[in-house]
Image (spheres, rainbow, N blue to C red):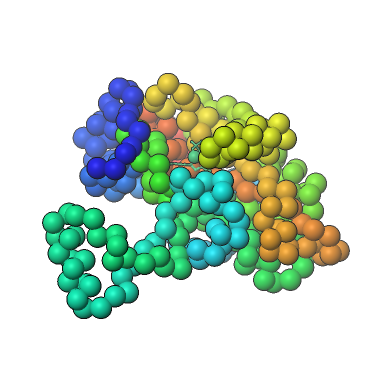
Amino acid sequence: MADYRPASPDQAELLDALVEAGHLIPSGVPGVYGRGSDYEDVRMRFDAYVTRWSKEAGETPEILRFPPVIPRKQIEDLGYLENFPHLAGTVFAFEGTEGQARAMAESAGKHEDWSEHQCMSDLVLMPAVCYPVYPAIGRRGPLPAGGVTIDPGGSYAFRHEPSGDPARLQMFHMRELVRIAEPETVQAWRDGWRDRAIQLLRGLGLDASFDVAADPFFGRSGRMMAASQKEQALKFEILVQIAGPEPTAIASFNYHQDHFSSLYGITTADGEPAHTACLGFGHERIVLALMKTHGLDVGAWPDEVRRELW
Ligand code: ATP
Ligand code: ZN
Ligand code: MG
């Protein structure tokens, strides 16, 4: 098996309990699980709960949906490989002759290395659910007055970070919302949602708190990028203790300034450069936090929590 980060004893214990209860279905690869019906029910209900909070805050986001792969060119343009080379998942495929196909199948049948028969395709797995939103909005021309709020849904994201921690998956759902507008509007939206999200999560009985955070930039220069991101408070996370030595981030609130908008030429109605921000709730981590807090038997959760979700 490829390298992966081993679980702490309490993470391993939680994973075993989740599998035993039928909430997670192991695939044999760390960080890749199927989901049982109660787990999936809570996940979908949480997604609807976020939609409800957005509506109650007076938002009417435009719904857009994208498949969980994006053009390879997009992560090349964004410099993703400079910042997160360790996380990207690239799609490879076979394009050879019949003879080469036989050679590939033979190696694969013996579980030998068959990568020499594969070519890089034009696709990479989706690293974050908001990525396809920016080029889509850029293509429309200048923003309408007041900008836009987009709901790209709770769809799959991939990160190559295999781990024995049931809260660190390779394929997981991230529910995002995206705001694209004037800088002050975007900042106020991001901060408003950070505070709203704390309430929303505490409303489900989670002991949630927020802190400034940084993305896991790669290598030594990455540590400087992370320090500067923290200094400018560009990223906030909401944290809950699930298992392991550190609390786990269950949601994040990210202000990108003009990182995406400059690349895709997104301008405000007045022709000024727009800014962007996004938030992401980690579905699986939130279900896990709820199960850790209220127990593995969803039917026995406290009434206050069930009233919010059911
Ligand atoms: P972490 O610091 O834990 O790696 P992150 O900063 O990489 O998290 P974001 O890029 O902000 O996370 O992603 C948004 C949300 O998606 C996170 O707050 C978290 O809830 C969830 N998430 C991120 N990585 C994973 C993962 N490997 N497994 C499950 N959920 C994840
Ligand atoms: Zn995002
Ligand atoms: Mg990460």
- Residue furthest out toward the right: 270
Residue 252 pos. (x, y %): 57, 40
Which image quarter holds the N terminus? top left
Residue 216 pos. (x, y %): 53, 38
Q: Is residue 168 visible?
A: yes
Judging depth in this view, the residue of 28 and 227 nearest the camera is 227
Residue pictured at 23% horizontal, 55% vertical: 113
Residue 131 pos. (x, y %): 57, 57
Judging depth in this view, the residue of 168 and 61 nearest the camera is 168
For residue 293, side relative to residue 16 (left or right):
right
Which image quarter holds the C terminus? top left
**14 w.r.t. 184: above or below:** above
Q: Quadrant of residue 140?
A: bottom right
Residue pictured at 39% horizontal, 36% vertical: 167
For residue 167, side relative to residue 267 (left or right):
left
**270 w.r.t. 307: above or below:** below
- Residue furthest out toward the bottom: 98
Q: Is residue 237 visible?
A: no
Residue pictured at 40% horizontal, 46% vertical: 160
Residue pictured at 42% horizontal, 58% vertical: 90
**228 w.r.t. 102: above or below:** above
